[in-house]
Structure formats: C-alpha cells, structure tokens
C-alpha cells in the first residue's frame, strides 16, 4: 500500500502528538513521517522544528529507554547499549543514559538476578555447571563479566 500524503501541516500536528505521548527517537519519527507520504526535505524540516520545540531529544529518549529497560526488564548495561545502538542513538547519548543508572541500584539488581537464578538451580549438584548456567543467564541479560565473576566467587 502506497503512503498517503496528508500534507505538511497535518503531519506536523500528528507527529507532535506522537512525540508528546512518549519519548521517541529520531529514526522512529522519521519513519512515521515518511509513512505520511512526505518528502525528504519536508521530513528534515519537521524534524528540525520538533527538536527546536523540544518535542524530540535523543538524549532524553536514551535516558528514558535505558532507565525503563533497567527497571522493568532488569537488563544490564551491555544489552541496553546494544539496543540503543540499534535505534541509531549516538555514543554520547548512550554514555549519558548509562551514567544515569545508579551504580548501587545496578549492583543490587545484578545481585537479585544472581540470587534468583542460584535459587532456581539449587538441585544442580555440579558447581561448575551451576556457575556456567548463572554466568550464561546474566551475560544474556547484559551484565558485565567482571561483575558476574565477582558474584560467582561467592559460590
């Protein structure tokens, strides 16, 4: 189905509402604008206006995304960084977003995830297998190997 050209005024109105509803990244907004049937120069003009009017902020998006994924899904920084890169976020904004996560909360979340997995594996007799499974799980969640290894020393 071909995109329907709704006009620049209507597109701008719709996209402001789209951005006001929740934090959006530039890539997402661009795709939405192109779906309205707009041309490149119109899309760039609207994007520029959204940034000036503070409807769109890559840094604000990155911080909100990182905080949300950390709190709700309990992801580690490696996974968050990877996902932000997939969304086309700059390294500067990724760094800012990761710094916004409190170190104490981060370590507490990692410890909680570690203890929950350890409890699930309480029937596993082989300590090497148990450690490998915990390490694999926490790595998949995006936590750093150094931090995981610190916790594994406690077993």
Image (cartoon, rainbow, N blue to C red):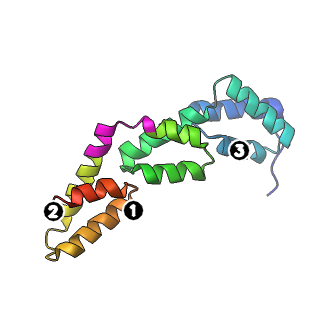
Measured from the top left, where is residue 27 in percent x and y?
Answer: 67, 45
Measured from the top left, where is residue 117 in percent x and y?
Answer: 23, 61
- Which dot, 2 or 1, sits closer to the camera? 2
Left or right of 116: which side holds 19? right
Q: Nearer the viewer, residue 93 or 118?
A: 93
Measured from the top left, where is residue 137 in percent x and y?
Answer: 33, 64
The N terminus lies in quadrant = bottom right
Q: Which residue is mark 1?
A: 140
How far, Cα to Cα, is label 3 from label 2? 50 Å
Instruction: Please tell me which residue is depicted at 79% across the width and 38% down the height of the picture.
Output: 43
User: Could you tell me what secondary structure mostly forms the magenta stretch?
Assistant: helix
The C terminus lies in quadrant = bottom left
- Which dot, 3 or 2, sits closer to the camera? 2
Q: Which residue is mark 2?
A: 155
Q: Earlier in the sequence, mark 3 or mark 2?
A: 3
Label 2 with label 1: CB-CB less than 8 Å: no
- Which dot, 3 or 1, sits closer to the camera? 1
Q: Which residue is mark 3?
A: 32
Q: Earlier in the sequence, mark 2 or mark 1?
A: 1
Left or right of 19: which side holds 42? right
In the image, is residue 149 part of the stretch drawn in magenta? no
Determine if residue 25 is in view: yes
Res 113 label: none
Instruction: Please tell me which residue is depicted at 60% across the width and 38% down the height of the picture.
Output: 24
Measured from the top left, where is residue 22 in percent x and y?
Answer: 55, 35
Snapshot quadrant of residue 143 = bottom left
Snapshot quadrant of residue 120 = bottom left
Q: How many marks?
A: 3
Instruction: Point out the stretch of residues depicted in magenta.
Output: 99-108
Label 3 with label 2: CB-CB less than 8 Å: no
């Amino acid at each position: 189905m071909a995109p329907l050209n709704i006009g620049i005024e209507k597109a701008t109105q719709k996209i402001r509402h789209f951005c006001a509803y929740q934090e959006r990244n530039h890539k997402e907004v661009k795709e939405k604008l192109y779906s309205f049937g707009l041309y490149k120069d119109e899309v760039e003009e609207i994007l520029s206006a959204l940034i000036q009017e503070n409807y769109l902020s890559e840094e604000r998006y990155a911080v909100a995304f990182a905080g949300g994924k950390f709190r709700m899904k309990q992801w580690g920084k490696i996974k968050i960084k990877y996902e932000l890169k997939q969304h086309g976020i700059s390294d500067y904004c990724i760094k800012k977003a990761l710094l916004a996560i409190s170190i104490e909360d981060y370590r507490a979340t990692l410890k909680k995830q570690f203890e929950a997995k350890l409890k699930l594996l309480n029937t596993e007799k082989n300590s090497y297998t148990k450690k490998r499974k915990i390490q694999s799980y926490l790595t998949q969640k995006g936590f750093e190997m150094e931090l995981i290894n610190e916790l594994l020393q406690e077993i």
